[in-house]
Image (cartoon, rainbow, N blue to C red):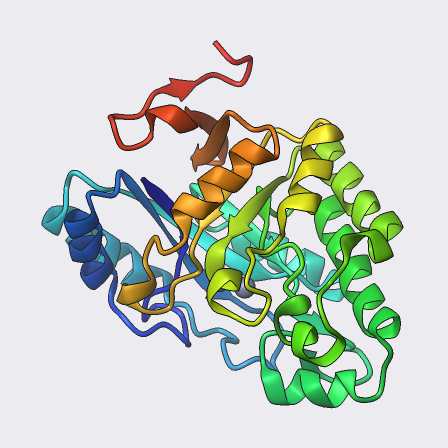
Amino acid sequence: MIDLHVHSTCSADGGASIADYARRAQELALAEVGMCEHADFDQRDRSYRYMDLARYDQEIAAARAIAPEVRLRQAVEITYQANLEAEIRAWLAVKRWDYVIASVHLVDYRDGWAMVSEQSAVEAYFSKHSQHQAYLPYFEELLRAARSGLGDVLGHFDLVKRYGTEHYGRLEPEAFADEIRAVLRAAVETGVGLEINTSGLRQAPGEPYPGLTVLRWYREMGGEIVTVGSDAHLVEHLAVGTDQALAMALAAGFTAITTFEARAPRWITIGDLGSGDTFLQPDGS
Ligand SMILES: [Zn+2]
Ligand SMILES: [Zn+2]
C-alpha cells in the first residue's frame, strides 16, 4: 500500500513528525509514503516561508533509519498562483524532489482572499456568489496550474467542493464539464497526473477529490498518471481511504497507479499492491 500525500510538522498545519508517520507506516506495512509538505508563496498565507528544507532533510534521514523498509519520498505541495509562477519555479529548482503536487487553494486572491480549504473565509466568499461564479475562477486557475508544468500531479482536483458541498449541494461535474475537460486536456497534453485524494471521504463531499466521473473522463482522454494520497495532517489519517481509491481507479479503467522518483513516473500494477510491488516502465513493459 502507498500514500503519496502526507503532511508532517514540517508543514505549518501538520500535527505529527515524519518519524511518527514512519512508525505508523511500519505498523500498517505500507510500501511507500510521500512526505508532501506545504510550500506557499503569498505573504498573506500562514505557510509563507514556513518550510525549512534543512530540517526536512534531517527529519527524512532520521525517519529512514527508523523504518528502512518504508520508501519515503521527498515531495512538496505548492499552492499554485498564476501571478507567482516565476517565484515558484525558482524555489522548486533548489532541491531534487521526487515529485511536486500543484494545488489550487485560493480563489480571488487578487481582489480578496478566499482559501477554499478554510471554512470561514470561503463561506464569506460563497455567500456573495452563485456556484458558477464561485467555482469558475477555481477551475480557471487549475487550468493555468496544469499548463504551467510546475507540478507532476494536480492536487485534490475539485477541492472547491470541500465547503462548497454544504453551501451549494453536491458538485455535479457535468455542470462544469467544459471547464473540467479543459483542465484534463491540458493535463494529458503536458503529462501532469491527477491524484485520488481520499480526504474528501472524511469531509462533507463523502467522496475523494476528484470523484469517479472526473477520473473516468481523464482516463477516456488518455490520462495515465494517477496517484493515491490521504492528505493526512495527523498520524491516524495515514493511508485512510486508499482501498476505496484503488477500487475507484480500477472502476475508472486504470490498472496501475503511479509513484515518482526524481520526478520520473513509475507505475505499480494495482493487483500487485500489498504483495511486493511490480514497477512498470512508461511503455507498459
Ligand atoms: Zn492542498
Ligand atoms: Zn495537502
Q: Is residue 6 left or right of residue 113?
A: left
Residue 73 x/y as whole percent: 34, 44
Q: Position of residue 54 (x, y in %)?
A: 31, 61
Residue 253 placement: quadrant: top right
Quadrant housing the N terminus: top left
Q: Nearer the viewer, residue 232 or 79?
A: 232
Write the residue at 63% across / 45% down. 212
Figure label count? 0
Q: Nearer the viewer, residue 18 or 163?
A: 163
Q: Residue 132, how many percent across, how many down?
A: 87, 69
Q: Quadrant of residue 270?
A: top left
Q: Is residue 73 above or below residue 24?
A: above
276 relative position to 46: left or right: left
Position of 25 with respect to 172 (left or right) is: left
Image coordinates for residue 232, horizontal then vertical, percent: 38, 63
Instruction: Please say whether residue 94 is visible from this viewpoint.
Output: yes
Residue 224 location, quadrant: top right
Tell me if I can see residue 265 in this picture. no
Q: Is residue 124 above or below residue 163?
A: below
